[in-house]
Image: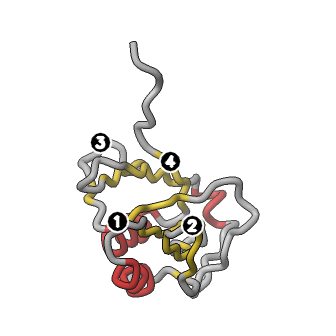
Amino acid sequence: MAGPRLTHVLLFSSDLERMAAFYAGALGFVREASPDAGFVVMRAESGAAIALHAVSAEVAAEIALESPPRWREDTASKLCFEVDDLAAARQAVLDAGGQAREPWSWAGSRYCDCADIEGNPLQLVVRPE
């Protein structure tokens, strides 16, 4: 048997519908059918998947979503997405309600640090051809 393969990343969310709409609008993820109203899988054309899991109502009541979202830089993870057009992808994040910092370069690649609508960090990257 081959080694383990990542099936998806899971994000807990206090507003499942808004998060699904964000990842659809910002990065083109498509929502898959789910028998569980508190669980949504969003899949990119490339096959990458993000699972969104609703937090309990009690936990959601303790979370204040801000607009623009507060960056959650105290987290131990960051979702990174390779894109073809950094400027267009950055604008799509902004148009979908997220935040984006100014792009920067390192080792021949271009990057843009962003946050989704709940402040989760994500990064866009264009690799050199």
Identify the residue under disc 4: 10
Identify the residue under disc 3: 35
Q: Image height check: is 96 above or below 126? A: below
**Residue type, label 1:** Glu
Q: Residue sitting at 61 percent across and 82 percent down?
A: 66
Q: Image height check: is 72 above or below 102? A: above
Q: Earlier in the sequence, mark 3 or mark 1?
A: 3
Front label number (4 vs 3) = 4
**Residue type, label 2:** Ala
Rendering quarter of residue 97: bottom left
Percent x, y for residue 9?
Answer: 48, 46
Helix, strand or loop status at disc 3: loop
Nearest to the observer: residue 2 or residue 47: 2
Label 2 environment density (alpha carbons within 10 Å; few <14, some 14–19, many ≥20)? few
**Residue type, label 4:** Leu
Q: CA distance from mark 3 to mark 1?
A: 42 Å
Helix, strand or loop status at disc 4: strand
